[in-house]
Image (cartoon, helix red, strand yellow):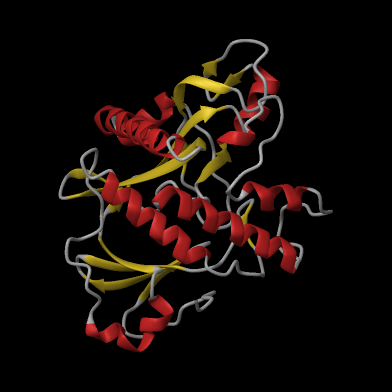
Amino acid sequence: MKTVVKTEITAYPLLSRGKVRDIYDVDENTLLIVTTDRMSAFDVVMDEPVPGKGVVLNRLTRFWMEKFREIVPNHLPEDDRFPAALAPWREELEGRAVLARKARPLPVECIVRGYIAGSGWKDYQATGAICGYSLPKNLREADRLEPALFTPSTKAVLGQHDENISRERARAILGEDIADRIEKISLALYEAGRAHAAARDIIVADTKFEFGIIDGRVHLIDEVLTPDSSRFWPAAQYAPGQGQPSFDKQYLRDWLLAQPWNKQPPPPRLPDAVVAATARRYQEACDILTA
């Protein structure tokens, strides 16, 4: 499998190069989205790629989008044959690229938390609440939240950080109808994904969804329930009251937190063993969830 860090496709104009994805303008209705092997953490792109990561993210996203079609439409077209103009880059794009219908992205990210972890755990320790939700006292790290919480955030540009916002703020940004709709869809997607994963002994602790408008309707876009956008915990090792082993980016985050680094570029060099362990976790999650 070819490791891809940065694409240089001359057949179409490059629209954007994000932390992970390179996006090209195919025509007035269509984008080419290439998921590279770039790895980011704390909104900083690492110097070392994670081989195979882009293929894992692309495979999982396509899997979930197909599975969730009855809940919400998505931006993948029915005809996904690549234009002949992309033939020179076929090997580079294999397994990691999709054609997508152009959408008007909504400027709010939809985070659903089913367990108390990460920034939610830090907020709870400081305030007893998460994003405006008052929670019971004496919760432990990694305790299950019932019901799951919808906690939107702003969608930051490259190099900046997302900011948690209240549901009321999301309504002010999006309008009440759209905000309520994507909240309902996000919770439905999370519950469906959580049930699928639980049957395969994986806990989906939390995740992030993104939506856009196509022909006046809400569509699911970007990535879906991947190790980059979610916390996946092995159910057999679940033990609340501490951090959990995982099949996601948390392993890398934990390694970085142990380094003398201020979370600003340049990042520390990732040892080969850390890169390999991250790649192994991503692949394992993908294999289990899509089996």
Q: Position of residue 275 (x, y in %)?
A: 67, 64
Count up the numbered dots.
0
Residue 77, by quadrant, is bottom left
- Which x, y percent locates residue 183? 34, 30
Pick out the residue farthest to the top.
137
The reply to whether residue 153 is visible in this rendering is yes
Q: What residue lies at 47% left-to-right and 30% top-to-bottom?
A: 151
Q: Is residue 142 above or below residue 32?
A: above
Q: Is residue 9 visible?
A: no
Q: Is residue 279 above or below residue 63?
A: below
Work out whether residue 216 or residue 143 is closer to the camera in this orientation and state it.
143
Left or right of residue 250, residue 216 in this image: left
Residue depicted at 18% across the width and 43% down the height: 217
Residue at 54%, 74% (x, y): give it. 5
In the figure, 86 relative to 147: above or below? below
The residue sitting at 34% across, 78% down in the picture is: 13
Residue 16 image offset from top left, x and y in percent: 42, 67
Residue 159 percent coordinates (x, y)? 58, 57
